Each structure stands twice: as structure tokens, then as C-alpha cells.
Amino acid sequence: MRRRSCASLRNLREAKVMAYTGRIGDRVSRKPKFSERFLAVVKYELLWNIRKKKFLGVLIAAFAFSTLSLILPIILSYIFETPLEANPNFVIGRGGISSGFTLFLFALVSVMNSISGEFESGTVIPLMTKPVSRSIIFFGKVFAAFLTISAAYVLLYVYIAIGGTLIYGPQNNLHLIPICILGDLLSTFVWVSIVLALGSLSKNTILTAISAVIVFISISISAPIVSVFSEGAWILNYVPGNGMSGYVKGIGQGMLPGSSVSTGTDSIAGNLVRYILNPSENVTYFKVEVGAGIKELYSEPLFMVLARSIFVALAYIAALTFIAWYAFKKAQVLD
Amino acid sequence: MDLAIETFDLIKRYGSIVAVNKLNLQVKSNTIHGFLGPNGAGKTTTIKILVGLLKPDGGKVVVLGEEVRGDNPDIRLKIGYMPELPRFPKHLRGYELLDIYGKMYGMPAQERKTRIQRVLEIAGLKGRERDLIGEYSKGMQQRLGIAQALLSEPELIILDEPSLGLDPAGMVEVRGIIKEIAKEGVTVFLSSHLLYEVEQVCSHITVIHRGVCLASGRLEDVIAKIAGPAVLEVELAEESEAVFEALKNLPFVSKIQCENKTLIIEFESNVDVRPQISQAITKAGGIIVYMNMRKRGLEEAFMRLITKS
């Protein structure tokens, strides 16, 4: 019995080592094309992204919030026994994905461990020793994040468009949805580049996530306060997030004599739609003075607001992505 | 002879610690070269420099005729590398990972398919390739490490502790695989703590300690040089002065001791000269009752080297 098992083990071993002999052909001598290497990295990252529980969780939450925004008016009309009115601007009037927080969350869960996670788990070692340059690895990962987030946004917009049409009747300007997606992607990629830079520099996922959340919360809390109570709020136009608060004259919202507008990088989608529909609009900035009410500061064309926010977003994306890329390229793999 | 790996005064520092200190390593092509040293000797650091994971602080590295400088992925086309305790993305399946790596090497779809099946078979992962890597045991990840190192049929395979985490049968399999791939003309550079494994498979070795090369060359030569050559123990039927004199005059005998009827013969080298000894004894009228060649082992040589340094 023992002899037989030894013999079978030997046969198995022989079968295995024999398998190496008898080559398929010549050794790999063909230099792979740039596109082959790049797409291989994109696939590597894409498969990872779509299986991340965090990403799926945020996607489900985004769908849940979208569902809530769709059905809340139905519930309210049922409670208050008022008829549900048709709203042909429901989809486009939202001005992009629900909030800057959603954009931030998508960015965070997509790339928070793209770089740092590889270093922490040691998976970067087999990856970096393949015939793929570090630049291809880095930009392949960024492109995979772009594809993943784009797909998520397309799904969300399609869902909102179908839901909005079914609940509020035929919708106007649905052709602007691709513009909204583009605007939201640009906004999201400001956060993506921040998270990537933090990840590349720290090579620690928890540190990356905590720092990114701190940056987001600090900006989100300070921006409205600075914007409403300070005359020097223009600085917020150059900081990621909501930016300054202003309004365009028209039907008032609360204490404002018009509808409110945010000028930051998170509001690109909404401002794009607003500009396409009303290109001559002006944004007026104000300051709240205790006891004196609202004091108008100055106005500027909506085009200026939009162009500046796009420029600022692109500048952040370029600068922070460069920092992240450089840190990744120069990283030494110690453990 | 061509050199697959050559380093010139290689230096790597971690702060004030010198991990690799002016290392001059030469690995001949088509050999199995063992890379030995105690923990912290600088083996993994050297290997990481060879594959471009670390940047040296000084010196030069040439792999397969090309200087390793900066991020040069084309050199890595010809190298298969298995890191110490390799880790792979848990979200991918074994097959998916190998397929992606195959694409990075520019392998066409059909070749990838055939080659992946082959390396899975070699590494003993057949049947588990569709499972998520997160469900693999340490040993299976080790096997996946071997599979991905062999995937591109490289000219040079660098294995850092390939048997770590494998069961005894797995270790035997790995040794078999290493021997077979070397027969194909592949250079294998093997770092291992298992001296027995190195002795079994390697033709050449380099021993380093504290980043410094202590010995390098053919396995037998290094052992002979460090631990001394083999010793032959011969028991005769009767004590004989004539036999003693005859053996003393043989050119390859360096020392001879006589204890009653037993002769302890030491040689200049590790070459097997038992037939010549037997012939000389018989010619001198002696009768051999017992003969035992006691070869010095790698373990003995290794310990002497490390203790001495």
C-alpha cells in the first residue's frame, strides 16, 4: 500500500515536471504593445473595483437615496392628500448626482486602496515585477477608476431618468444627461486625485481614508460659514468642494431673492446644465450681516463661474495626479 | 561563459544599516545558483534590486546583458520572479490573475490558455484555478507564485524561498520542477534557507552575510574550500606499512592517518578517487574490508563561513 502511494506520488511528480518540457513555441520574445500592457492593468484593476464590497455598498446607498428622492414626493402627497403634479424638469433640475458627499464617497471607495492597498498587502510586488512600467500601472488604475465611476453614474442617471419619467411624466432636456455625467465625473476626479495622492504618499489605506474624510469634512463645514459671513469668500472658488454660495435672480429660495448657486468644483454638472439652458445668467454673491440681513457683494457671469470651476478642477486633478504618480514611480518596495 | 546576473560593488543602505555592501555577484547562465545567507544577510534586498523593486545606493546591476537602471519593464520580459511568501489580489481568481499577467507579457489568447493550463498543472493548482485567491491557503498562494513565475517561459527565474509554506510533498515537487526547468536552459537563481534543498538542486552557490559575499562558485568547490575535501575511511584486513606508503605517495592524497587497521585519508579535492585508492591498496598487498567516503556537507561549510565572519 505504502509502495503504491509512493509510486503514484512519483508518477504525479513526473507528470508535473514533464509538463514543463515540450514548449508551446519560442519563449516570449515579442515585445508587448503599450495597449496590451495598459489594458491588462485596466482589467486587473477593474475586476478588483467591481468586487470591492465598499464600492458596491456606496452604489447601493446611492440607488437607495435616488429611490428616496423619487418616491418622497409621492409619500408626501399621500400624507397631505395633495395631488402629485407633473414635473418635466425633475431629472435635469437636480443638477447632477445628489450631493458633493456622494461624489466624494464614490471617489473614496474607488481609489482609497488602489495604491496603498497594493503596498500593504504585498500584491504590488508581483505586479511591479511584470513587464509593465510603473506609469502604466498607475494610469491603468486611474483609468479603471474612471470606467468604474462612469458606469456607476450612467446606471444612476438611467435609473433616475426612467423613474422620473414614470412618476413625474415626460421629462425635458434629457439629452443633457451626458453633460451632467461629464460634469459629475470631473467633480469626482478632484476627490479621486486627492485620495490617490494621499494613498501614494502614505501607502496606508486607513491613513488615506481618514485624511481624505478630514479634508472633505473641514472643507464642507468651513465653506458655507466662510461664504455666508465673510467678504473674502472668493478663496473658496479655488478650494475643492462646494465653493462660494451665490444666487441667480429669479424665483426666490428662502431668504434669497433668487435660486441659490454653488460655485465650487462639486457643482460643475449643475452649473453646466444651468449655463446651457440660460447662458446669460449672472451669479450674485452676498454676505449675511447679523441684524442687517443680506448684503449684496458683487455679480459675475455664470460662464465665468463655470469656466473657473472647470479650470480649478482640472488644475487640482493634474497637480495631485502628478504628485501621486511621482510618489508611486519613486516608491521602493521594502516589505 | 555568459553571465545571467552580474553585480558590481552593489550597495544598499536602510538609514545607517548597510544591507548590501559592495556585493559582486556572478551567476552563470544555464545554472541553478543558490543564494544563501542567514536572516538579514541581504538576500531579499539583493533580489529586489535585481528585479527593480529597490533602487541601489551604489554599484551596478546587469541582468541578462542589460543594465537594470530605473523602471525598465522590457528587462522583466525575460525574468520570472517569485517573491518570498507571495501575495496576490484576493478579489481575483487564480486563472484570471494568470490571464492578466499573460496579457502583460503580450501572450496571444491561445498561447495564454495553453500556457496557463500547463503552469497550473506544474504548480499543482489544477482544479482550483476558478476559486478566488482569497480562498487559497498559504501553500496554494505559494504554488500560484511558482505558476506566475513560470508563465512566460523566462530565460531567468528568480525564486525567493520557493519552498516556504509548502508541505513536504510540495517541497519535493518544487525541487523536481526546478531541476526540470534548468534542463530547458533556464537559469535559476534560488534563495533558500533550506541547505538540504540547495545542496540537492544547485550547481553553484553564493553565500552572503551582512551584505558581503563570503564565498561563491561551484557547490563542490565552495564546500571543499570552506569545509575541506572529502575524507575516506578504509578498514583493512591487516595493518600494512606497504599500503600506508603506497597511499602516501598518491598525488591527490593530502593527509593520511592510521588507527590500527583503519586508514583515514584526506584529499586535495572532492573528486571521487575510490577506484584509484582501491587499486593502490590491492597492488600493495592489502585487503579492503570496509570503505566509506565521508563528504563534507553544505551545512558544515555554511556554518564555518558564518561563524568565521
Image (cartoon, coloured by chain):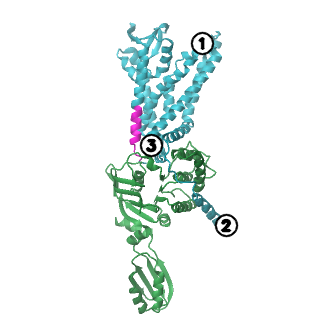
Chain colours: A cyan, B green
Work out whether mark 3 precedes mark 2 in sequence or the reverse, and give the earlier one: 2
Label 1 in the same subunit as label 2: yes
Amino acid at dot 3: Ser
Q: For mark 1, give the secondary structure.
A: loop
Please say if A19 is above or below A137: below
Amino acid at dot 2: Arg
The residue closer to the viewer here, B138 or A210, is B138
Give the image location of residue A236, x and y in percent: 39, 20
Q: Chain of mark 1?
A: A
Q: Label 1 belongs to which residue?
A: A88
Residue B116 visible in the picture? yes
Give the image location of residue A160, x and y in percent: 60, 21
Q: Label 3 belongs to which residue?
A: A133
Q: Chain of mark 3?
A: A
Instruction: Answer whether residue A329 is magenta in the image.
Output: yes
Asked whether disc 3 touches disc 2, contact meaning CB atoms under 8 Å apart, the reply is no
Checking the image for residue A4, the label placed there is 2
Q: Chain of mark 2?
A: A
- Report, in whole angstroms, how far the alpha carbon at label 3 lies from the one at label 1: 50 Å
- Report, in whole angstroms, how far the alpha carbon at label 3 lies from the one at label 2: 50 Å
The residue closer to the viewer here, B156 or B230, is B156
- Which region is colored magenta? A320-333
Work out whether mark 1 precedes mark 2 in sequence or the reverse, and give the earlier one: 2
Instruction: Answer whether residue B288 is magenta in the image.
Output: no
Q: Left of B44 or right of it: where is B182? A: right
Q: Left of B208 or right of it: where is B130? A: right
Amino acid at dot 1: Pro
